[in-house]
Amino acid sequence: MDTTKSAGKDTDWTLMPGSAKDIEQVRERCRRLVRRRAAISAGVSAVPIPGVDVVSDLGLFTLLINDINQEFGLTPEQIERLQPKYKLIAYEAAIGVGGMLVGKLVTRELVLMLLKRTGIKILVKQAARLVPLAGQLVSAAIGFTVFRQIGYQHVEACATVAQELLVARRT
């Protein structure tokens, strides 16, 4: 990870992975991060207070997506530093893999929109809470699975974009 300071301004940034091996290492690191955050989400889902899990998931997803983008060098700021042809490749690759959060400034509203896409699973998770202890466990399991699935999809989208940029830089 490269960190630089210039003109008194904090400009922490990560370079894009420079090889297929680097992409694989970042992918694995991000997948571990997804699993850790999914476990936190599941723990919060087990708490029988309505709405706490949704608020927690919004915050956790926002941080997770931003952290994954940062790891792959695909935050909006990092992409803006690319040469114009590489910016275009990055955005085209993101669109091509359905990575709607790759290279985007991720807000709670954007994450809420993403969560609404998985509305059926969230509805089942909420309904499962109505059954005392077993419902809380089912809710936590569903929360973990949904969180992990969305996180893994984003990791794969970022890895694909990084791979496309790697190929483009070599030609």
Image: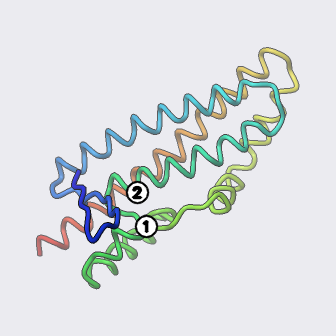
Identify the disc placed on residue 69: 2
- Up the image or down, 43 lies above or below 168; here it is above
Percent from the top left, x then y, of residue 52? 76, 37
Name the amino acid type tagged 1: Gly
Q: Which residue is tagged 1? A: 103
Q: Could you tell me which quadrant the C terminus lies in? A: bottom left
Q: Residue 102 falls in which quadrant of the image?
A: bottom left
Q: Residue at x 50, y 47 (%)?
A: 64
Looking at this view, name the residue that lies furthest to the left: 170
| Disc 1 + disc 2, Cβ < 8 Å | yes
Question: From the viewer's perspective, is residue 19 above or below residue 148?
Answer: below
**Left-right relation of 84 to 152:** left
Q: Secondary structure at mark 1?
A: loop
- Taking the view exactly as shown, the residue that stands out farthest to the top is 133
Residue 3: image location, x then y, percent: 24, 56
Given residues 134 and 72, the one toward you in this image is 72
Q: Nearer the viewer, residue 97 or 83?
A: 83
Residue 144 falls left or right of residue 121: left
Residue at the image position 29 percent from the left and 85 percent from the top: 84
Up-down: is 160 above or below 59?
below
Residue 8 lies in what quarter of the image?
bottom left
Is 144 on the left-hand or right-hand side of 123?
A: left
Q: Establish if 142 lies above or below 82.
A: above
Amino acid residing under circle 2: Asn
